[in-house]
Amino acid sequence: MTFTSKAPPRGITQLRGITWNHTRGYLPLVATAQRFSELHPEVSISWQTRSLQAFADQPLAELARSFDLLVIDHPSVGYAAEAGFLLPLDSHLPAEFLADLSQHSVGGSHASYAWQEHQWALAIDAAAPVSGWREDLLAEADCAVPQTWEELLELARRGLVAVPGLAIDSLMNLYMLCTALGEEPFVRPREFVSEDAGIQALCLLRSLISACHSDCLARNPIATWEELALGESIAYCPFAYGYSNYSRPGYASHPLRVGGLVNLDNSVPLRSTLGGAGLAVSRFSEHYEAAVEYAQFISSSACQSTLYFDAGGQPGHRDAWLNEEVNRRSNRFFAATLPTLDAAYVRPRFNGYLDFQDAAAPLLHDYLRTGRAERDVIRSLNALLSRCMTHPKAVND
């Protein structure tokens, strides 16, 4: 899908951008592009979309040859820095502007796009797995929002829980459970996680997936929130990357309530894995000055708290998350989930990490579907990480 009005007149600077195909990822970029062009009639911006899976999978180096503006996932910045296809934004934006973004970051969002002393993207969107529920369906089932892992399993066994179980989402949930068990992934040299912690985390994740309907293994976060907001059977989701759209009246037939994550051991809530999206500028752009100016416009507090949110976006600037009007119009989505995002685990960004993520996710998904000795799975993941760090495909491609 591409947003264009008509071919720009001669003498107009034409910028092309690519993002992902959901209201949250597309419409705020269309709206801000339109407004930017009204303020700068010499610039025209068109946006094209790709699927959520392609957002994680498609090689950025190829896209940077075709687009001026790229919406990216933060683990790609290590590869991007070494391959040299993105513009270091700190060399083109005022230091005081970047300092403001850093000061008003949602969790580690802003810093997640920094690597090797350069800022490779601006956090225009912030997200992490949060919980969500239907108050009406929980009331009908005479159930409360679960507070502990055991309460969550009890609710799942009653058929009231859905969790996104696609390969990549399951991997993010495994990171979350390892962290909850006291061991952050990737801390040990060339080791994803220790065997003991990894085995415990795998067993916990499979116990939840097994208690839910098998459809979960085919759902991503969007499909999960759609089912929760539109259906009449699923009442609760314990963790899925948050989409404020489903908490907004008019977007969802049953606007969802959202909140933090359950406690694993009755003390500390689970710590989810940071997501979100950053806006980067291609080093190959012939009009990078205009692209950088647009990036500054869209990531500013003023735009993020108004036009960006108004168009269905999920801002990356903290001012928007604390804005009372933004929260009033989203069933308090942002205020209710901000502590979860502030505590979220930030994935690695070294060159080779994406290779690990791409190969580890289907390996884990196969375990969840068919079963396998947990120790073998963790040993396979550890061996995979060692190979990816030694011979990252990103360098050899």
Image (spheres, rainbow, N blue to C red):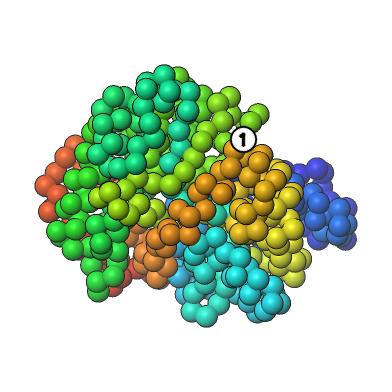
Find residue 286 and report its horizontal and vertical position in percent.
72, 68
Residue indicated by mark 1: 248
Q: Viewer-proximal residue, 303 or 278? A: 303
Where disc 1 sits, the SS reads: loop
Left or right, 7 with respect to 64, comes to right
Find residue 294 and report its horizontal and vertical position in percent.
74, 62
Q: Residue at x 42, y 67 (%)?
A: 349
The answer to whether residue 205 is seen in the rendering is yes
Quadrant of the snapshot with the N terminus: top right
Find residue 43 and report its horizontal and vertical position in percent.
82, 58
The image quarter containing residue 139 is top left
The image quarter containing residue 300 is bottom right
Find residue 267 and report its horizontal and vertical position in percent.
30, 53
Q: Residue at x 39, y 43 (%)?
A: 239
- Where is 11 relative to 177, above or below? below
Q: Viewer-proximal residue, 311 or 144? A: 144
Left or right, 359 with respect to 18, comes to left
Q: Residue at x 62, y 40 (%)?
A: 330
* Callout 1 crowding tier (Cα within 10 Å): few <14, some 14–19, many ≥20: many
